[in-house]
Amino acid sequence: MSVRIAELHDVHDAASVIHEHLSPAPLVRSYALERELGLPAGRRVWIKDYGWTPVGSFKVLGALNWVARNLARIGDRPIAAHSSGNFASGIAFAGMTYGKRVIVVMPESAPQVKFALTRSFGADVRTYDIARDHETGERDRLTREIAEQENAIQASPYDDADVIAGNGVGGLEIVEELKRQGRGVSHFFCQVSGGGLMAGHALAIASGFPQAEIIGVEPEGADDFRRSLVSGARTRLEHPTSICDGLLSYDVGEHNLPILLQYVRTAVAIPDHSTRQAMKWLDTAHGLRTEPSGAITTAALLAHRASLDGEGDVVVVLSGRNVDGLRFREWTADL
């Protein structure tokens, strides 16, 4: 079966869908990061904060566009999906918006805030043991069983052209806002897991700021994209590990990799300790309590994992803020 790769026009088409339901997530200037990094006065650092969406992460963008583009195929059938948690609430919100039943498979260890959000939008949640999933394949088996037994349409959290295009609307928002201010971009930092967030954003950023260096950020224990970038082919990790629960995909999606290989030249792997430090830094400097997956890009900046030489602004994606209070305190207390 051929793979349809998302293109820039798909992202523009998705914008009308997304903006019918959502206001743009804020793009916030970080004076604190500018000072911390020692940038000259003419350069700025911006945080695209998806914690402000109704589901607390970027995942709602791709989910909304996927449901909107597949309404005829869905009909009166339910939607089935697996998710570490943020796509679960995103597809639940999209299902609620379009009046569709949603069934999601989530790790039993997912943050309680992600369970609560997902259920608040009316989704039916099933759970599995993520610690043994690399041995059992339970996540994919449960999702397939739901699709087969309940005649559900299965949605991918990242490996789908409509999901990628929806996510890319956030990148268009970054481009449009910074061009409105007459700014340029030298560096763009974005999380990579399955690749749906980065692929969509890379399409938009590369078009609007072709000179920008687009940098992928992953946990050290889940750096399948960094390895794929080196080899030029999809590389699978059999047991990804990190506190970044949203960045534990086994490999980059088929729909994502061609886009990433075209636009992303650099990928950095960040230890969990640095991510924890960034979580505390964002809380102290900006009052932003973030999940690890959201903070890891700021960690890459604070740890100076990429050269910022050049002219133009730096943009960093904060992909989500759904973290349980107790875990946040545990991760940041001893730093």
Image (cartoon, rainbow, N blue to C red):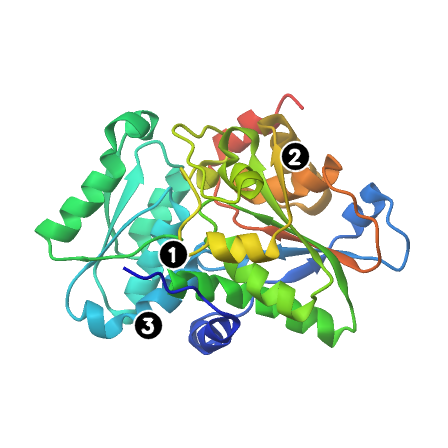
The residue indicated by pointer 1 is 90
Q: From where the camera sits, is residue 301 visible?
A: yes
Q: Earlier in the sequence, mark 1 or mark 2?
A: 1
Mark 3, secondary structure of its residue: helix
Tell me how far mark 1 sits from mark 3, CA to CA: 15 Å
Query: Which residue extends farthest left?
Result: 149
- For the point 16% across and 48% down, the residue is 146
Q: Quadrant of residue 121?
A: bottom left
The residue type indicated by label 2 comes to Lys
- For the point 57% across and 57% down, the residue is 262
Circle on res. 69:
3
- In the displayed structure image, the side of residue 15 where residue 301 appears, left or right: right
- For the point 29% across and 50% down, the residue is 119
Q: Earlier in the sequence, mark 2 or mark 3?
A: 3
The residue indicated by pointer 2 is 280
- Circle 1/circle 3 CB separation < 8 Å: no
Tell me how far mark 2 sits from mark 3, CA to CA: 39 Å
**Mark in the foreground, 2 or 3:** 3
- In the displayed structure image, the side of residue 38 where residue 67 appears, left or right: left
Above/below status of 153 relative to 305? below
Above/below status of 160 relative to 329? below
Dot 1 crowding, Cα within 10 Å, few <14, some 14–19, many 20+: many
Closer-to-camera residue (17/101): 17
